Image (cartoon, rainbow, N blue to C red):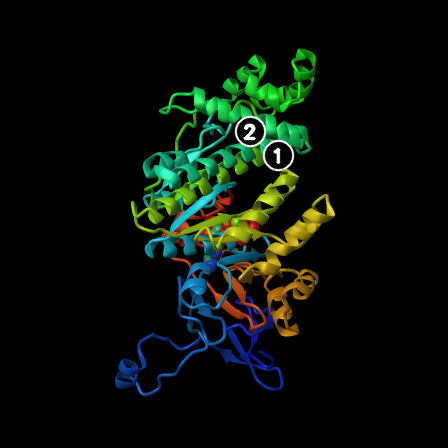
Amino acid sequence: MRGGPRVRSRSGTDLAKGSPRGWYGPGGGFVGNFSPPAMWRATTVQACGLWPFSAGSGAPAVGVPLGRHLFTGATVCGDPLSWFSRARYISNPSLFMLGMPGLGKSTLVNRMLIGLSAMGVVPLVLGDLKPDYADTVRALGGQVISIGRGVGGINVLDPGAIGAAARRIGGPAGDELRAEAHGRVLNMVAALVAIVRGQPMTDHEQSVLSASLHLLRERTPQHRSPLLPDLLALLDEGPERVRAMTLDRGDETRYREAVDPLHRSLLGILDGPLGGTFASETSTRIDPAAPAVCIDISRIGESDTQLTAAAMLAAWSDGLGSVAAAHALADAGLTPRRWFFTVLDELWRPLRAASGIVDRIDALTRLNRSLGLGDAKITHTLKDAEALSSDSDRAKARGFVERAGMVVCAGLPRSEMQELGKVIGLSEREVELVSSWSSPPGWAADVRSEEPPGRGRFLIKVGGRPGIPIQATITSAERKLHDTNTRWADTHGTAASGEGDMR
Ligand SMILES: Nc1ncnc2c1ncn2[C@@H]1O[C@H](COP(=O)(O)OP(=O)(O)OP(=O)(O)O)[C@@H](O)[C@H]1O
Ligand SMILES: [Mg+2]
């Protein structure tokens, strides 16, 4: 990319090399505005017949149309699922996106959601924190489920879609699925206990919990699911099968000593900081046939870290259970095969909320190929990983970027880009280009014409290949679905997104 055209913003500020807005001569003088010639795509057979100047472009054309190549103007298409399954450009269907706030990261992922949905993929936003995706999912005819105090809850003892699939499939495959459902419920309760305690459960507590859950399932009628208060009542009662796990040897005091810490933590889930969100029936279940699903947890306050972490884990557990159920039903020939696309936006928030979360995301990232799902993770900077408390969590969080099939950078400061370069390999020119997108806009007199220079600009990196710089332009429909600057609308109704025509 060395020696490319230099850039001038609309206000005349020299920003960087390589924008389509201006060309500079060898002496550095501004020689004129440049906008890429109009381009159309067609097969070489048709294009040559219509137009003699057809040329191949180096830009990938498989997947969701994302924008135009910043220098050639060619259409650039891409998304983790298409690049993994159809184009085979990447070895696992995952995307990691980094960039300063307000540059359009969530907007680009919303575009992927829309495009993938049109290809028959089911988008799953399992914990929308702002919400960035609820309106898009609604517009796609999908299901939006709200979770929060007094808004809606999830019964963590309900195996959800996976339990229903086990019953439908029956036989040994059904039993296998039932065992998986048990494991998911056990992990979920263990995760909630770890969140309220601030440390993981012990191994013998897990055995007690597992035996209690089995017994509870046997005692509860098929058509309903047990609830956390039922689990507490069971521990209180102390049936023989549960006692056997505590090695009480017939001594009541030994039994109580063994189960009281678990009992206390479960009481904490019901009445403590989680405020009963997980104590009663699931308010709205995930619809296995929905074309898209968004679990909206935006009503949970930002400072409510424990509830955020718990709601996010419960949403993943439920959502990924639905994915496992869908695959099991497809394996049994009962439903058509579906692929899924999960989005973890504002990753830094759940990462900091509880240490167990890093492990969950880590497991998801490693399993996504076998689960038939692609995923996109979005955060601001690599420093979000550095802010984690333990060395192992930091290493795992860095691993998300290292293992991502596609890394997409929106504007980032130079120091950040250099750090990122150590992980994914970036040329000096790429560092320079992306850091220029993080600079503020010029001091234009007409404030409405000034936008952050990096808004809608992204560098797509795959392995050691040179990055593909793109400019994404959004449609008015997309802007209406996702304008995160609406609260900054001035008295004339013009949002800080810089568009005066959206009133
Ligand atoms: N390509 C684009 N062209 C013009 N405006 C855009 C573009 N992309 C996004 N915007 C607008 O910019 C604003 C910020 O976008 P968005 O919320 O996607 O940024 P973000 O990078 O996800 O920010 P954050 O890190 O705070 O979540 C929105 O109002 C959106 O409508
Ligand atoms: Mg965002």
Q: Is residue 258 above or below residue 290?
A: above
Task: Decide: is 115 above or below 158.
Answer: below
Identify the residue at horizontal 50%, vertical 79% (top origin).
32
**Residue 210 - label:** 2
Foreground of the two, 464 or 308: 464
Amino acid at the residue labelled 1 = Thr
- The part of the image, by quadrant, that contains residue 120 is bottom left
> Disc number at residue 136?
none
* Percent position of residue 498, x then y: 48, 54
Which badge, 1 or 2, is on the more N-terminal residue? 2
Disc 2 marks a residue whose amino acid type is Ser
Q: Is residue 451 above or below residue 59?
A: above
Q: CA distance from mark 1 to mark 2?
A: 27 Å
Res. 472 visible in picture: yes
SS at mark 2 in the image: helix
Quarter in which the N terminus is drawn? bottom right
Residue, disc 1: 305
